Amino acid sequence: MIQTGLYQIVALPDVDEAALAGRLAELGDGTGVVGLTRVTSGFAARVLRRRGTVPFYVWELTVRLMTAVDYAFDENIGRLNEALKGLGVVADLDVYTETSSGNEGQP
């Protein structure tokens, strides 16, 4: 089973957007941020920026699970906020479960 969590991140007031974007890029695949479990077999992450005047990012975390048990994406929010080092904060989280894919064997 594959699930994806979309962590919506906003910059804190007076934060340089380039610094936040750089920090998000440094997170890579989330090592040190995401909680590993006995049923996870792989992670992939990427950073998306929403168009607009207010800096708004999405950290997309895709998890491959070995069973049909949901991954606890919400448990990563505190670690992600700490990893952002005062540059931004997680404002919301959306979670999706893949129902079919032409990319079997990924992330």
Image: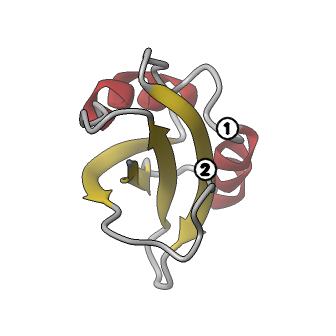
Q: Where is residue 23 in the image (x, y as percent from the top left)?
A: 68, 42
Give the secondary structure at mark 2: strand
Task: Please say if 54 is above or below 71.
Answer: below
Instruction: Pick whichever, 31 or 54, lies toward us.
Output: 31
Please state which amino acid type lies under the numbered disc 2.
Ala
Residue 89, picture quadrant: top left
* Quarter occupied by residue 4: bottom left
Observer-nearest of 47 and 38: 38
Residue 36 image position (x, y, % from top left): 49, 19
**Residue at 48% of width from left, 23% of height from top?**
82
Q: Earlier in the sequence, mark 1 or mark 2?
A: 1
Do the residues bearing badges 1 and 2 touch, measured as CB atoms within 8 Å? Answer: yes
Residue located 74% across and 49% down the image? 22
Residue beneath the point at 67% across and 38% down: 27
Q: Name the residue under label 1.
A: 27
Q: Which amino acid does label 1 sit on?
A: Leu
Above or below for 49 versus 51: above
Is 19 positioned to the left or the right of 67 in the image? right
Q: What element carries label 1?
A: loop
Numbered label attached to residue 45: 2
Q: Is residue 13 above or below residue 82?
A: below
Q: Nearer the viewer, residue 48 or 107?
A: 107
Classify mark 1: residues with Cα within 10 Å, few (<14), some (14-19) or many (20+): some
